[in-house]
Amino acid sequence: MLRPPLAPADLAREPAAVVWASPSVRERATALGLPFAPAGTVPAGASTVIAIGGGAYLDRAKAAVKRDGVARRLVAVPSRWGAGAEVSPIIVLDAPDGSKAIARDDAWVPDERGSWPELADTVDERTALDGCADVWAHALEAEVSPLAGPEVRAQAAAVVADLRATEDGTDPVWFELAARACAVQAQAGVGLAHGIAHVLEGATRHGHGALIAAWLPAAWALLRSRRDAPEGPPAVLHAPAVQAETAPVLRERWAAVLRDPCTRTSGCRVRRDDLEELLSWTS
Amino acid sequence: MLDDRLKELLADVLLLDPEEVTEDLTRTGTETWDSLGVVSLAVGVEETFGYHMRPEEAAAVASVADLVALLRARGVELRA
């Protein structure tokens, strides 16, 4: 069960705190009335970092504070939904070769999470929908994960039901849905859609959410052809242009996708010759 | 001779060429037969043969020969 998040008024009262904010939200973050510091640095006297940004920004903050110990405490405030980094024990960082370095430690979950719904204004509609697709992928892939026990499956199914009931992909309620979906998948695993995204992120100009939005529908259709599974996400989340643009790269990198740990713990067997079915899927 | 379906399944989940899959293949001798391979194999066995391997069964399979013996003992018909 997730603890309730801290509201901006609570954040502003954090003692001995310093703010790290991504450029897109820095101006808004001044409303907290707290001192700022360059990301990664903690001035003398500060023991708590309030990090405000997207998933990648929060993961870098988790690496600095929870993994490397530059401060005693981390409060993670997402400025966009999707990754759920604010509740996740997983850190995803860019490796020097452009690939993603993914590591996990239960000690890396931030000490607290914040909720600032107004930050949704800083995100354009397509980016918001890409985040929704990532939330759907976490919940769906967790529900069918071979690493999920009955209780986790039931939690995932409850999240999926709430996602299906939330039609507006720009509603800040998605912040909480993202946190719930990520907390569930952290107890299970993800699957092929994430395997594809992880490999293509290092090989294309597209971010994680966009690649999930591009390939989750095809990956989910493949899985549903093999086993019982809930219906996939609504069509509005699909990113067909990104799917078309990245299809040749998926063909080149298919062997790497098959080797990705997320693909290997997918809810269905992913076969070598599934590539053509994925590439031919259209919305 | 291994059942064709089993050979194809093992090739897929262990990321091997089908020619490399023999009854002599062992978990310790196969780099891709790691903890993820155990999970993938269990998923694949259920999909292909309809048999749900319990986690302790999947973890105890140390070779293709073990897997063949387990499936036959559980009533799965394998083509020789």
Image (spheres, coloured by chain):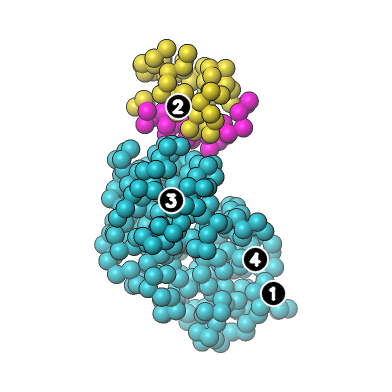
Chain colours: A cyan, B yellow
> Would residue A208 be visible to someone looking at this image?
yes
- Residue identifier under label 1: A41
Label 1 with label 3: CB-CB less than 8 Å: no
Specify whether disc 3 shares its chain with disc 4. Answer: yes
From this view, report whether residue A7 is shown above or below residue A61: below
**Which amino acid, mark 3?**
Ala
From this view, report whether residue A203 is shown above or below residue A55: above
**Which amino acid, mark 4?**
Val
Name the residue rendered at 55%, 56% in the picture: A203
Number of the front mark, 2 or 3: 2
Name the residue rendered at 53%, 37% in the picture: B36
- Residue identifier under label 2: B8
To which chain does the residue with label 3 belong? A
**Which amino acid, mark 1?**
Thr
- Residue identifier under label 4: A65
Label 4 with label 1: CB-CB less than 8 Å: no
**Which amino acid, mark 2?**
Glu
Rendering coords of residue B16 (x, y %): 54, 30
Residue interval drawn in magenta = B28-48
- Residue identifier under label 3: A193
Name the residue rendered at 31%, 43% in the picture: A224
Query: Disc 4 versus disc 1: distance between alpha carbons?
Result: 10 Å
Of label 4 and label 1, which has the lower sequence position?
A: 1
Name the residue rendered at 45%, 28% in the picture: B9
Q: Residue furthest front?
A: A248
Specify whether disc 4 shares its chain with disc 1. Answer: yes
